Amino acid sequence: MTANIIDGNAVAKEVRSRWRGRAETLAVSGIVPGLAVVLVGDDPASRVYVGRKTKACKEIGIHSEVHEFSADAPEEVVLGRIGQLNSNPSIHGILVQLPVPAHINTRRLIEAIDVRKDVDGFNLYNVGALVADSTVFPPCTPYGVLCLLEHTRVPIAGQNVVVVGASNIVGKPMAMMLMKREATVSITHIRTRDLAQYTILADILVVAAGKPNLITAPMVRTGAVVIDVGINRLEDGRLVGDVDFEGVRQKASHITPVPGGVGPMTVTMLLVNTIQAAARTCGIEFEA
Ligand code: NAD
């Protein structure tokens, strides 16, 4: 068996095109969706990510602003700006680009964001709402994975899903979202003994560990759907996921490549959450 490649760029393009139309509809009624990105310090990777987000906003019809602070900016100053953005009616989504410098309490910044504007979905209210089945904003990366599965028409209810990685931004919310869709979910992490005994049972395997070649063909069930969230830069400069792509594609039914799989979906779902946030201000809820 050779797997179908799930083309994240193609799905992202389709989703963006649908939501661009929705942003245009809102703009006609005088609401231009607005996103504010708070960037503290000069981490080069963060700058690249912020640049990608603002470019994507422009392409889809979202007004975006970057609120930059020097690496030694006091926490109170950043909190003050978040407060202003909370009460700015032209801003519908706010995100803090992570990581922030060590003297700043990340949790305090995220908790300061108005829950109706928390488009990353990291605020504790959103985390709780996800667990309690009434999410305000699904976190973008697992939301993107779900969207890829739905586009590929992969059945979820009743399937065995194994999530490798249990972080707050990917693994845990991913497991919650799939459980909500009635999958039987196992979560594994760095302390899991004999990872393969879990992964081999997966109809759907979602891998988000940040370890190149963690998942090899013998660990994967024939016909499984394999979603590789990992992004790793090798010493030779290549970008790879956590899955041995060439080996596993001989066994899986569907597989995401890296790059070009989950990556393009993460920014797409940020755009989706921002447009949805803007729509909610006038009582509209677009279908996901
Ligand atoms: P993290 O470091 O916060 O968490 C990693 C998780 O993987 C932890 O729960 C850890 O216990 C687990 N883990 C690590 N080694 C393991 C092993 N050998 N066996 C089983 N579990 C193991 O990372 P994160 O923020 O969740 O990101 C994970 C990966 O996904 C990274 O490569 C990151 O770059 C990537 N990522 C990609 C996107 C995207 O848009 N494609 C978005 C977010 C993160």
Image (spheres, rainbow, N blue to C red):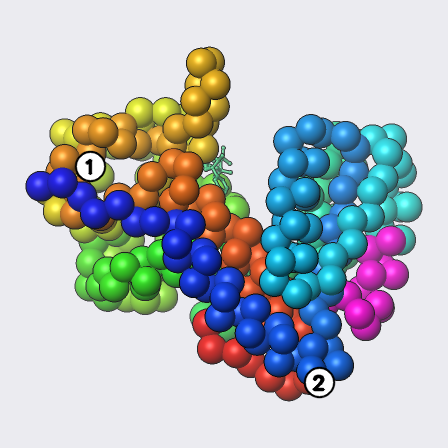
Q: Residue at x 89, y 46 (%)?
A: 76
Residue 90 drawn in magenta: yes
Q: Residues within 10 Å of mark 1 (few under 14, many from 20)?
A: many
In the rendered image, residue 94, in percent from the top left (x then y), is placed at 72, 58
Q: Residue at x 16, y 47 (%)?
A: 253
Question: Which residue position holds label 1?
Answer: 249
The label on residue 29 is 2
Q: Is residue 94 left or right of residue 211?
A: right
Is the distance from the Cβ of mark 1 to the nearest ligand 1 atom less than 8 Å? no
Question: What amino acid does circle 1 point to?
Answer: Arg
Question: What amino acid does circle 2 point to?
Answer: Ser
Specify the quadrant of the image occupied by residue 84: bottom right
The magenta region covers: 81-93
Q: Secondary structure at mark 1?
A: loop
Q: Secondary structure at mark 2?
A: loop
Which one is in front, 27 or 283? 27
Q: Is residue 99 left or right of residue 203?
A: right
Residue 253 drawn in magenta: no
Quadrant containing the N terminus is top left
In the rendered image, residue 138, in percent from the top left (x then y), is placed at 51, 61
Which one is in front, 158 or 252? 252
In the rendered image, residue 2, in percent from the top left (x then y), is placed at 13, 40
Question: Would residue 54 be visible to someone looking at this image?
Answer: yes
Specify the quadrant of the image occupied by residue 27: bottom right
Image height of 97 relative to 270, above or below: above
